[in-house]
Amino acid sequence: MVPLWMYLAVAAALFCLGTYTVLSRRNAVAVLMGIELMLNAVNLNLVAFWRFQSPLNMAGQAFTAFVLVVAAAEAAVGLAIIISMYRSRRSVTVDDVDMLRW
Amino acid sequence: MDCINQLAQCLNQGGMDSGLAQFISIFLGVVLVATFPLLVTILLIWVERKFAARIQDRIGPNRVGPFGLLQPIADVVKLLSKENITPAGADKPIYNLAPPFMVAAVLLVWAVIPLTPYHFGVDLEIGALYVITVASIGTLAVMMAGWASNNKYALLGAFRVVAQLISYEVPLAMAVLIPVMLAGSMSLQDIVKAQYGMWFVFAAPLSAILFFISSQAETGRAPFDLLEAESELVAGFNIEYSGMKFAMFFAGEFMHVFTNGVLMAVLFTGGWIGPFAEQAPLLGLIYLLGKASVWYMISLWVRNSVPRLRIDQMMDFNWKFLVPMSILNVLVIAFLLQVIKQVGLTPIDPNNFIQNLPQTVVLLLGNVFVGYIMLSWVRSKGRQARAADEAKKMPAAAVHAVGD
Amino acid sequence: MVVGGLTPQAIAFGFFTILTLGGAFGVVLNKNLVRGAVWLIVSLFGIAGMFVLLSAPFLAAVQVMVYIGAIGILFTFAVMLTRSMTNMRQRFTTQWWSALIVVGLLFVFLMSGVIVPVWGGISPEQAGDVVATTTDLGVALVDGNQFVLPFEVASLLLTAAIIGAIVIARQHEEE
Amino acid sequence: MIDLTNINILPWLIPVGPLLAFAIIMLITNRSKMVSATDKHEYGGHHPDYDGMTVPVVTARSRVMSITVGLSGIIAAWAIAWTVAGAATNFNGVFGQQVFANSVEWLATGTTTLSMGVMIDPLNTLMLIMVPLAVLCIFIYSIGYMAHDPRQSRFFALISLFASAMLTLVVADNLLLLFVGWEIMGFCSYMLIGFWFEKPSAYQAAVKAFTTTRVADVVMMLGIVYLYTLTGTLNFRDILYNPEVLEKLGNTPAILFTGMTASSLIGIFLIIGTIGKSAQFPLHVWLPDAMEGPTPVSAMIHAAAMVSAGVYAVIRMYPLFEVGAHPHDGLFNAPLMLMTVIGGFTALFAATIAVAQNDVKKVLAYSTISQLGFMIAALGIGAYVAAAFHLITHAFFKALLFMASGSVIHAMEHGEHHVHAHGHEDDEDDEHEHSASHAIEAHGHDSHGHDSHAAGADAHTGHKFDPQDMMNMGGLSKRIPVTFITFVIGGLSLAGFPLITAGFWSKDEILADAWLGTSKGFGPQAFVFFMLAAAAFLTAFYTARQLSLTFLGEARTEEAKHAGLGGPSNISSITMQLPLIILAFFALFAGFVGVPSDFPVLGEIFSPKYPWFGHFIENTLIVPPPHPIFNWIPLLTSFGVAGGGLFLGWWMYGRKPLKAGEPDPLVNILGPMHNVLKNKYYFDELYTIIFIKPAQAISKATGDFIDKGIIDGILHAIATAFRFTGDLIKTFNLWLIDGFGDSIGQGIGWVGSRLRFVQTGRVQNYLLMVVFFALVLGLIFIASAGTAAN
């Protein structure tokens, strides 16, 4: 049986990679992908903890399910925003969207 | 003890290391499950061509072998001998990955299909969901192929297909829900076993129809063959593929059709159930394939007799007719099931045909109700459209009752 | 059956880890966003595999369906519609190095937290054999005492998201 | 799910009805249309201030709907309240012993949690019997009384809110909830006293009432907070009914006030709150002015709700005050002494003032103050039962009196209007022709407001007329017989007319209890006994005076001659007389529940075993107070004071009633003293001198002397000194100071111009910051966790 900390380690690595994607990619779509990665890291944590700590209490799985829902909604809306942004500015580069600056 | 059904124990008694024996048995099982559909496909090609020919009042393949039975072999040889073209500017890895994905998407389904009472790849707790899930891999494959081959026709075709596949997954899933509800389990084996007394096709014909239609659309054949609408897009997303890669798509499609037949059999017409299926498991396999080929024939029949839809018609048909109907269907069936449970019509012994009758009748009535509602709704909409057209002094024939 | 002292779970875990993290690296580093999407799907598939290992098959299936079937496709669509695969001359923002440092620190932090459970949480080596089934999850999701309310709210959220996405992304008539 | 059949849940619902009514009226049914103020047909309460502008006048539909909603809300409250009270009184035979309680966790304050809840025990059972009935009567009454007022919906909404607040206060099971109701009532009284805010006097009175009570409320809040800090709970039963908490309170010395126990300090704080709320001696000034409000409001404030609330709070908290004191054994402590002195003094003091008042409502106002003094004094000497008893009876007959006086005023205004309508030909027209005459006049007396209208009348007719002045009345008994009879009943009850009135029994009980101590030679009891006896005498006197001046004899003015409620068919006359009759019944017979058992004859009749009331109410206390043994002295005393006072009053005013323009006989009897009384001992002036003038003087002095003189002087000196040095160091200044200041400015500007680039507008920068600081926080958390671990 694979111990819990391994799962957590994988989740941590995944989370960091997602964060780095969010922080460093210029393309908005890539940023969204990073967010998906982070969410999945969270899911992995949830399920792992559920499995190892309280396999009979469904909270872990239920939360994962809700995170999935939220992720789906987030992706849909985010991509829609990106598309409309592309329509208006002909660009999906995050750096180009900096009207709110000094 | 028979070495057919319990290979692992058999080998084990043959003095082999248990783990290895297990591995070998699993391996054999996988190989069998994976190769069997491919082999069937070769036959299917012949069947399909013959069938189409008969419908179109032709003879069909008749040169190679008896009744042209060896024709598919010849095709395979031809395809093998063709050159594998990879277009310049194609995204190579994705381009090459797409066909295997296509095949895998279908083959994976076979992993959970109960071939006999005792033989199945795995009996997943969530088999039905798994079936729907792997279908999405096919979507992915189409997407990859369409994009990777760096060809605008391919891309357009891929867009259409993806739109179509994603849309039709909704009623598909909804339709699968019904057997799951009736059997009270998502494992296909349980679903099959729940049909001892009564096939679900009688209790829920509407969902059977829904599943059939949407799976037909999933395969992307006529009347839903917009992905490779020869006359509009030049063969759609797989335009750039040739040789064995194309053959993979091709085989994938054929297998998909037959797999759908198998699924129909498993979900609605009691899979391997039949006389003495328990005693002689292989008999069960035969029953399953028989039922499956019946459904397969029907789908071929449809394919060869119904014209192709416009894409807007297809979408309308899905979103404005199938999806509402499937949702309504699920709601009504769920409600009726509760009612039945409360009233106490649930069969004491589910395997008893007679005891199953009342429940089946009630559910059947529910289906009739739903179907009537949807059809009359469509009728009224059609009337309105026709009236509008008459008001616009346009030919009323332009309006299809189905759709808008 | 044990191969090289590794249980099948261990092997599968390693495989899925490779899938997950490899896919994640692909997402980070890809030059081409469609490949990025594919990498994302690979990574998420790995996660699904992990779910299976954690005996949450339902979540695994949903993961594959939602992410590979829906979100992955959605991303590919978005990439193609916005032609993002072009103009990829510079992938990273100018702050990529600072982000690298911060994320590195974050990783060290998290790993330290994982390996040395500072907040007293003991990480059990062995998980219980008795595990709730998909049925339990279904019951929990519609149980009045457990998650029925979040469940309904989630459905509402999805509806709102669908409508919102359509409204946002629709071509406006006047244009 | 809430089980409404559960009697413990039911009290929650009592305040809900009126509250909902308030919300509905305010949000939905309060529709008014703007009409020209000069349009007397639309806007009855004509007022000069409004001429030329448009005023919001409630529409007829809104009026009906508002009345319906409010009435139904209050009826609901009344029904539930009486259900609960019924369940409380005959709870499987033993009454009083059981308590309905239900509470919910409300807010967690550190270690302790405040729980909001309801509790029904004998004491507030009585309040539940009294309050909703009185409120209901008042509401019905005001339907007729406010019939022609603008902003009626608002009036009914406020009354509903008021009722809701009062009921909340009654059912509350802890001091905080009680205080909430208390404060809401304060607000409502402010709004209602100032209901006719066109009149400067009205809104001034409102502000006065609000501020005066606020002063007291702050002190009360102090008490509550202190109590909470000491006990960690505000629940009545947790504090008042477990001896160890009281013990603890009794033993801990108070903060700041050394030599006093905490319980005493808290008690004094709470009592001060009550002094403000029920207008006891130093803070009584607001109550007479509160008469500016519509009469139903006066009835509400002085009978059913606010002032009773003050006394109720004291009765409720009585066990706390009694800690370490046994008034029946002559052992007193600070709060009890305070109550005794204040109450006794106020009783007499206010009674004396009431003697010399000519305004119908002012007389009643002062009599209220004095009656409340009775209760407070009774509590001071430990006559718990008697105080509660008097609270109830007083509520009934005082509400009755106020509404009766209101209908007198109404009648007078009507008469006045009639005079203005018909000119001054005095035809003895009967009610019928009267009502016929309404129909034909477009701006008939169906459309006249109240006091505001009186002012309006002066605007176009020369002579000043005050419809509340008793000197303008007389002979009204023939014009408004129903009002007359009920007024007489209420008056006799107030005066404590022996044996047949409720007031007699309660007052007698107080006196008896006081005599109990007096006979043992305890000072306070004696003080109370004599003060109250004197006050009772004066009460009887001014009651007789009021009755005679108002009803007996011949009408002293044209208006009085034509006074009337506009015919028996008139809605206002019906709705205004029905409550009077109901209350008159209670004013007469409510007393018989408390007849002492050892009373010569009636005792056997009404309370063979024990006095129902006392037996019921004393279950509120852990140790029931002793029943006063029957004694002829207090009985004869109350006979004497009541009979004597009534007789004297009748002899002076009723025997040969005043003619028009004839002066008040008191004037030449009392001489200058009369002016003092008439001007309420110049208390307002006194406060003006004591508080307001000094404040102004001090500020002026500060302004003139300290500011102009000292500070400015110093500044000038400094200035002159520095001008010199400044010249010296000008050059220095130029390069150093300026350079310094400029460099600061420039530096800041430079930093800003650099810092603003933080605001890149790029979401990823922000996110980077977020992650970074989240990391920092995480490290801090780990560090703290690590330190906490070891």
Image (tube, coloured by chain):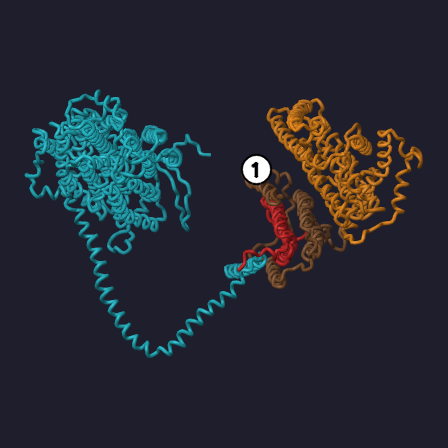
Chain letter matching colour red: A
Q: Secondary structure at mark 1?
A: loop
- Circle 1 is placed at which residue position? C143
Q: Is residue D159 above or below residue C17?
A: above
**Between D341 and D452, which is closer to the camera in this rendering?**
D452
> Residue placed at 29% from the left, 36% from the top?
D37
Residue B311 point in image, percent of width and height = 72, 37
Chain letter matching colour orange: B
> Residue placed at 51% from the left, 65% from the top?
D753
Quarter residue C113 falls in: bottom right
Q: Is residue C107 above or below residue D610?
A: below
Question: On the picture, is D604 further left or further right than C32?
Answer: left
Q: Residue type at mark 1: give it.
A: Asp
Residue B359 point in image, percent of width and height = 66, 24
Chain letter matching colour brown: C
Quarter residue B209 falls in: top right
